[in-house]
Amino acid sequence: GENVEQHPSTLSVQEGDSAVIKCTYSDSASNYFPWYKQELGKRPQLIIDIRSNVGEKKDQRIAVTLNKTAKHFSLHITETQPEDSAVYFCAASREGSSNTGKLIFGQGTTLQVKP
Amino acid sequence: EAQVTQNPRYLITVTGKKLTVTCSQNMNHEYMSWYRQDPGLGLRQIYYSMNVEVTDKGDVPEGYKVSRKEKRNFPLILESPSPNQTSLYFCASSLVQGRDTQYFGPGTRLTVL
C-alpha cells in the first residue's frame, strides 16, 4: 500500500543553524504534501504545504521542496530558534481520485534546537 | 471560536467494554478524520469521512467503527477494545480534504487494560 518514509527520526541542531527533514513517498499519484508541527503535549498544526504543480514553496524561515521524479520532498528550516523544537510530520495524499480522503503520514522527526 | 473538540480527553477502560470517543467541529467542514498516534509510528489514519453519510477506511480501521449522521459530529466507536488499541487518538477536520488545512482536536489518551 501507500507509504511515506521520513528521515531522520531525531535531529539536534544549534540555534541559528538550518534543519532539513526529508520524506519519500511510494504512490506516484500523490499530489498534495502537507507538513505538520506538534509541540510537546499539543495537537499537530499545519505549517506549510505544497502541491505537485510547484517545486518549492517558502514561508518566512520555512520552505518545502518537491521532486516528483524522485518521489521525495523536504522541509527546510533556516535560522532555527528554540521554539522550533517539536515533532514534525510530513504527509502525502491524492486529490481528485477515489482515494482523495486518505492522508498518509511519515513517522515523525523530533527536532531539538539547542540554545 | 472555531475548533475541534474531543471527549473524553483521558480514558482508562478494560478489555471488551464498548466505548465511544466523540468528535465535534463548529467550522462547517465537510471532511473529518480519525488518527491514532503511537511512538515511532507517527500518525495513522483510522477512518475518514468526506461528507455526511460518507465514510471510508484509512490505514488501520480494524477494531473501530465510525458514523457521520450529521456534519459536525464524527464519533469513533470501539465495540470491544483490546490492549493494542491503547494509544493517543486525534480527530481532525478540514473544509475539503487535500485543499485545506486539517484542524486537529486536542487528543484523547486511551488506555485499555
Image (cartoon, rainbow, N blue to C red):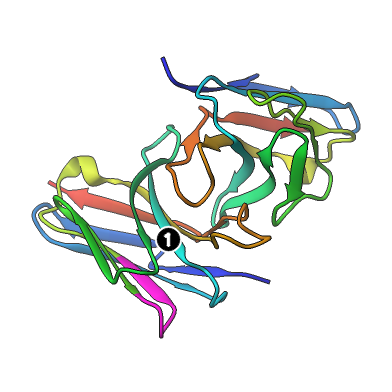
In the figure, is residue A111 to the left or right of B59?
Answer: left
Packing grade of label 1 (10 A; few <14, some 14-19, many >=20) is many
Secondary structure, mark 1, is: strand
Residue at the extreme front: A96
The magenta-colored residue range is A67-74
In the figure, is residue A78 to the left or right of B43?
Answer: left
In the figure, is residue A3 to the left or right of A11?
Answer: right
Q: Residue at x 39, y 37 (%)?
A: A40
Residue A73 magenta-highlighted: yes
Residue A90: x and y, percent? 43, 58
Q: Residue at x 50, y 34 (%)?
A: B104
Quarter of the N terminus of chain A within the rendering: bottom right
Circle count: 1
Residue B23, picture quadrant? top right
Q: Is residue A35 above or below residue B15?
A: below
Foreground residue among B47 and A22: B47
Residue B42: x and y, percent? 54, 53
Residue under pointer 1: A33
Q: Residue at x 11, y 52 (%)?
A: A15
Residue B87: x and y, percent? 65, 40
Q: Residue at x 57, y 57 (%)?
A: B41
Foreground residue among B13 and B55: B55
Residue A13: x and y, percent? 19, 59
Identified by mark 1, the residue type is: Phe
Chain designation of label 1: A
Foreground residue among A45 and B109: A45
Residue at the extreme top: B1
Residue B58 magenta-highlighted: no
